[in-house]
Amino acid sequence: MELAEGVEVVKTYGSGTGVYRRFTDAVDRVSEVTLRWMAAIGLPFTVLTVLLSAGAMVSWIAGAGTVFVVSGWVSPGVLVGVLAVGVGLPSGVEQVIRLGYHVADGRRGAAALAAVLAERPLPQPAPGDARSPRGARVEFRGAGFTYPDGTRALAGVDLVLEQGTVTAVVGPSGSGKTTLARLVPRFWDVTEGAVLVGGVDVREIPTRELLGSVAFVLQEPVLLRTTVRDNIRLGRPDASDAEVEDAARRARIHERIAALPAGYDTVLAGAGGATGGGLSGGEAQRVTIARAILQDAPIVVLDEATAHADPHGEAAVQEALSALAAGRTLLVIAHRLHTITGADRIVVLDGGRVVEQGTHEELLLRSGRYARMWERGRVGSMA
Ligand SMILES: Nc1ncnc2c1ncn2[C@@H]1O[C@H](COP(=O)(O)OP(=O)(O)O)[C@@H](O)[C@H]1O
Ligand SMILES: [Mg+2]
């Protein structure tokens, strides 16, 4: 789970570094160099382009793969197989990301690694078919999703998130909330129906543009083992120090960072949740919110962003989220009911289907599912 979320950060911020970073020190060093380089040249997608060239594929796979072979996680034969396939794959960030994911997964054995050979990368639109989103409206049209293992997580979801509105999703654990959120930035593609961003099917939007439009704050704050400054700057690698600090101020975390031993140059310990640098879960969350603020995407997806904040820190996280949400299209997976009563629309999911939607008042009047959850005060404990 932690790994999967690391992958999302990597995907969202357009760098292949994070996945590798989290496994071995050797791999860490590669990442760190790349991260610095990325920050230095200030063009994440240049890095992507380079990463996606065949030559770079060889060095990435061989470099990371060698570590895995040396560590005894995979056999050299598997590495050669992955190398052969990796080089031949058509370009697309998803390949690098998914490859990284599965290579990392190979820690549990070569079988997991072999899955990469079977996995089809997320297809990119052909250059002539690519379209740009117009505006920041998000629409689910008959959207359904079944995980590769056959788990049907969503079915027939029709939902419109008007530009600049806040939509909160609630429902019991396993009802499909996280899955729904993941469809917007194409962490997964629908298996039925479609998801549209700015009137365009997300599958027709070049990955680069889509990830530029959608910021994602994860359930677990995922921080890389690098400075606070670079962690925030992942949102926009060409941002100046002043811009990084401004984002931190708006995320209500600047003063806390300034009080760290080396301020913005304090190196965080990395890995989801375990932040080092003395940051609490809520503070780490605010660092990731600062990152998303800096990214300045018109659409923001928040998955239970306050889940790990202590009650005291929760208010600060809420303030940070308000700063992030202002003027954007927001999809928030609600952790605590009282935080979403003001949402423009509340959507109740159950068993992968939308069972109710409306404003807080409308749903209370309906005396249905939501009203019962509200009465029990139980939404807060839902995952
Ligand atoms: N990576 C996965 N592979 C297979 N099944 C999954 C995966 N992630 C979630 N699921 C399943 O999909 C359903 C919806 O999960 P999820 O979207 O995480 O719900 P929620 O966020 O509301 O708790 C659940 O049955 C869950 O077990
Ligand atoms: Mg969830």
Image (tube, rainbow, N blue to C red):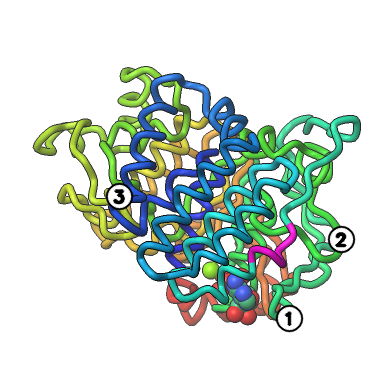
- Give how far across and how far down residue 248 sits, in percent: 32, 32
Q: Is residue 118 visible?
A: yes
Q: Nearer the viewer, residue 107 or 293?
A: 107
Which residue is the site of mark 3?
Answer: 284
Q: Is 82 above or below relative to 300?
A: below
Q: Looking at the image, is mark 1 or mark 3 nearer the viewer?
A: 1
Q: Is residue 66 above or below residue 240?
A: below
Q: Residue furthest right?
A: 128
Name the residue rendered at 62%, 33% in the picture. Answer: 212
Query: Is 3 on the left-hand or right-hand side of 88?
Result: left
The rendered magenta stretch, by its main secondary structure, is classed as helix
Mark 3 vs mark 2, CA separation in Å: 36 Å
The amino acid at mark 2 is Gly
Label 3 amino acid? Ala
The residue range painted magenta reads 116-120
Helix, strand or loop at disc 2? Answer: strand
Identify the image quadrant of residue 54. Answer: top right
Q: How many marks?
A: 3
Type of the residue with mark 1: Gly
Query: Element type at marker 1?
Result: loop
Name the residue at 45% across, 19% down: 41
| CA distance for labels 1 and 3 | 35 Å
